[in-house]
Image: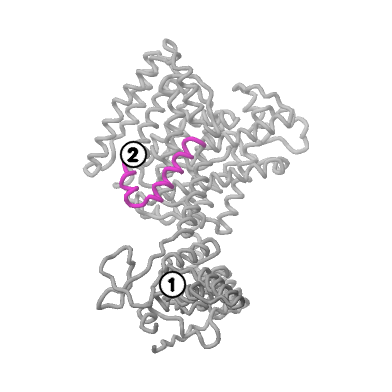
Amino acid sequence: HHRMFLEPQEKKRSMRALIVKQAKKTCSCTPAKVKDYIFSFFPVLQWLPKYKLREYLLGDVMSGVIVGVLLVPQSIAYSLLAGQEPIYGLYTSFFASIIYFIFGTSRHISVGIFGVICLMVGQVVDREIQRAGYDLEPAALSVLTDTAAYVNATVSPANRTSQELLCDKSCYAIRVGATMTFIAGVYQVAMGFFQVGFVSVYLSDSLLSGFVTGASFTILTSQAKYLLGLSIPRSNGVGSVITTWINIFRNIHKTNICDLITSFLCFLVLIPTKELNEHFKSRLKAPVPVELFVVVAATLASHFGKLRETYGSSVAGRIPTGFLPPRPPDWNLIPNVAWDAIPIAIIGFAITVSLSEMFAKKHGYSVKANQEMYAIGFCNIIPSFFHCFTTSAALAKTLVKESTGCRTQVSGMVTSLVILLVLLVIAPLFYSLQKCVLAVITIVNLRGALRKFKDLPKMWHLSRVDTVIWLVTMAASALISTEIGLLVGVCFSMLCVIFRTQRPEAPLLGWVAESETYESLSAYKNLQTKPGIMVFRFEAPLYYINKECFKSTLYKQTGVNPVWVKAAKKKAAKRMLREKEVDSAGNQTNISMDFVSEPLGFHTIVIDCCAVQFLDTAGIRTLKEVCKDYREIDVQVLLAQCNPSVRSSLIRGEFFKEGEDHLLFHSVHQAVDFA
């Protein structure tokens, strides 16, 4: 055996030098570094100068207009869910789109109001309103709301008493919502500053796909009541999908025939047209904006046919216009809402990063998780001064945006312009737009996410673990809730990684003739073995979770448990001693001697460590115990193909006795030759 000498690199372990080096790197200021920092903090400066006007503009404008039209009634519905007046939902959607345009790295996601976030905001708003002693009756739209909010924004601090008197329930509600939005945004920016964006690596492809499909069921369920024209309470929280369907079937006899027929006709137009758009997308410069045509035609039909007055169809209704002066959050409310803002901030970030990663992967570009946290944080901090509540990426509108031709966040600016026109000028024109039409558009654009079921057989063939992760995440997102489903998916995928290292593959290896290669005997035929030598490979890190699995698998594969062999030897020795003491020699003693002297069939075990990424203290102790136990029954254990990290751990853990480090081999073939 010719030992191979490798001289290790010198490692500078001076913490002081490392800190000084990092400080110099961080605190240095050069024009190039300033430019890189500005460009990374404001991604719009990177991609906007490269914008391809002829190629991108039509798709961005169409998707921006369609999402803007969809946002108007959804902003109204979700603002009421958040305990706010409808006008504040439009403010939120308007400002969020503009700010994400500046700070965001995703080209496709639509940032604005999201049902889960609105529900959580509404719960805190209701609690604070009750604490403040306001009546919990629903606040009607009135001139007093705008007047009170305006006075609150402009009155001097000296006239505090009149200010408090003029702040009614809706004014106080948006004050609570804006304050909590500000705190949630601060949390998200802090997460970005401290580089917590690495958590996005735990969101695997199968997890993201399952989450989107499961959330699509929630969205479809929430829109189903509009297809039938039913007025049933919105169900939220755990099990909202099941509760909503129960309520739908209980009220199915109240179906509005006009809304049902309208929904059917819209499906009849949208589904074939969307399929044709996808089939001929390579020949079309931009998809046909069939959603926009449907919205215009449905609005005209509803207005001139007087569907609301004649048949009681549910329509978007009146939307107030105009802006209110900005005002800062109420600093006195921060202690009340600071704790509630933590889960809202985390869920908003998780949803935004999940959708950003998914659409970036689909369209072949990358997003920066930390920058996404900055973006969503500023989408909350800045609008909180303009009477807005918490935002995040919204799945339904993102799917609509992507499927209607969006290429960049210019579509977000177009969406803001549409909402601005609604806020200032054309609000009355949407009065007659039926909600069932918007529901149909949303559901039709969920087809891509729901088609993932067709990929399940292929996914199962490729990886059963990924398929199970997909199914668990999808089921949890659909049947429990979207935010809990995402958490369940992350936890389950981590458990899958742990389980896979807890029970890894651990085969015996055989020699490929006329080579120095060793492969699994259970996987390949015609492999040769060396007499008296067993080669064993453990295909996972060796640490506290799988140390017992390592030992039991090694004993099973070699067919010899050294502990049992030692115990049998001791038992036989005691029996022999007992027999000698009573002077009873004979067959039994001969049997014991035969048992003790029975050969094991091998004298060396070579452990192939090429797949062992690391060892912890429990792993080192386990290797020591295995080597010691086998040595006591005259079997030597050799280690081969250890990576530098494992070698270093073994040396630090004093695995080798003095002068025994030569028993660490750089290849299995070398170890076998030595044996």
- What are the residue bounds of the magenta stretch? 454-480
- Which is in the foreground here, disc 1 or disc 2? 1
Residue at mark 1:
609
Amino acid carrying label 2: it is Arg
Residue shown at 47% from the left, 30% from the top: 72
Residues 9 and 46: in front is 9
Above or below residue 347? Residue 442 is above
Residue 431 falls in which quadrant of the image?
A: top left
In the current view of this chain or complex, which residue is farthest to the top?
310
Numbered label attached to residue 451 = 2
Query: SS for tag 2?
Result: helix
x and y, in percent, of residue 207 in the image: 44, 48
Answer left or right for 574 relative to 437: right
| Mark closest to the chain's N terminus, 1 or 2 | 2
Observer-nearest of 426 and 560? 560
Name which residue lies at 29% across and 47% down. 55
Asked whether residue 648 is in view, the answer is no
User: Does residue 399 lie above or below 313 as drawn?
Assistant: below
User: Magenta region's main secondary structure?
Assistant: helix
Amino acid type of disc 1? Cys
Q: Are marks 1 and 2 in contact (CB under 8 Å)?
A: no
Which of 466/155 is in front? 466
As for residue 464 lying within the magenta part, the answer is yes
Q: Provide residue 323's location: percent of width, then percent of height.
A: 56, 33
